[in-house]
Amino acid sequence: QVQLVESGGGLVQAGGSLRLSCAASGRIFNIYIMAWYRQAPGKQRTLVGFIRSNGITTYADSVRDRFTISRDNAKNTVYLQMNKLKPEDTAVYYCNAEAPSGDKYWGQGTQVTVSS
């Protein structure tokens, strides 16, 4: 079992920055891919991006060049640095861990609100 706890959400003005953190505990040696998703009110949850254990990252087109995902394996933590935030980035952001077995785990989510 893996437990994920997100932090760092809040209210920010358009053009500002936030950094989200996701601390993992449990059977972390099985974690392979760490991902961030987001869900805006009334919309489906969508992928923001993910990072493999070797550090290779992939991003959704809507956030590429503005968001950066990184991981600190020694701290069992993954980060989402969000720059140049836009009102349309407003959503609940979720951390996700996918084990090599395919099992997936979710955090509780953290709210990000970007005011115009």
Image (cartoon, grey):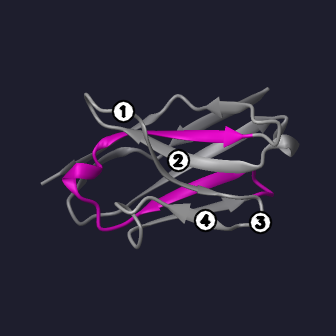
Distance between mark 1 and mark 4 Cα atoms: 22 Å
Distance between mark 4 and mark 2 Cα atoms: 11 Å
Image coords of residue 27 (percent x, y): 85, 35
Residue that label 4 marks: 57
Circle nearer the viewer, 3 or 1: 1
For disc 4, the neighbor class at 10 Å (few under 14, some 14 to 19, many from 20) is some
The earlier-in-sequence mark between 1 and 2 is 2
- Say if 69 sits above or below 115 in the image: below
Numbered circles on residues, count = 4
For disc 1, the neighbor class at 10 Å (few under 14, some 14 to 19, many from 20) is few
Q: For the residue marked with disc 4, what is the amino acid? A: Thr
Residue that label 3 marks: 54
Image coords of residue 62 (percent x, y): 34, 60
Task: Determine whether, in the image, residue 14 is placed left or right of residue 80.
Answer: left
Q: Residue at x 67, y 60 (%)?
A: 71
Q: What secondary structure is found at the residue carrying circle 3? A: loop
Image coords of residue 115 (percent x, y): 17, 50
Q: Residue furthest left?
A: 116
Distance between mark 3 and mark 1 Cα atoms: 29 Å
The dot on residue 36 is 2
Distance between mark 4 and mark 3 Cα atoms: 9 Å
Along the line of sight, the residue nearer the viewer: 59 or 79: 59
Q: For the residue marked with disc 3, what is the amino acid? A: Asn
Q: Which residues are magenta?
A: 73-98
The earlier-in-sequence mark between 3 and 1 is 1
Circle nearer the viewer, 1 or 2: 1
Distance between mark 2 and mark 3 Cα atoms: 17 Å
Q: Residue at x 65, y 35 (%)?
A: 4
Residue that label 1 marks: 44
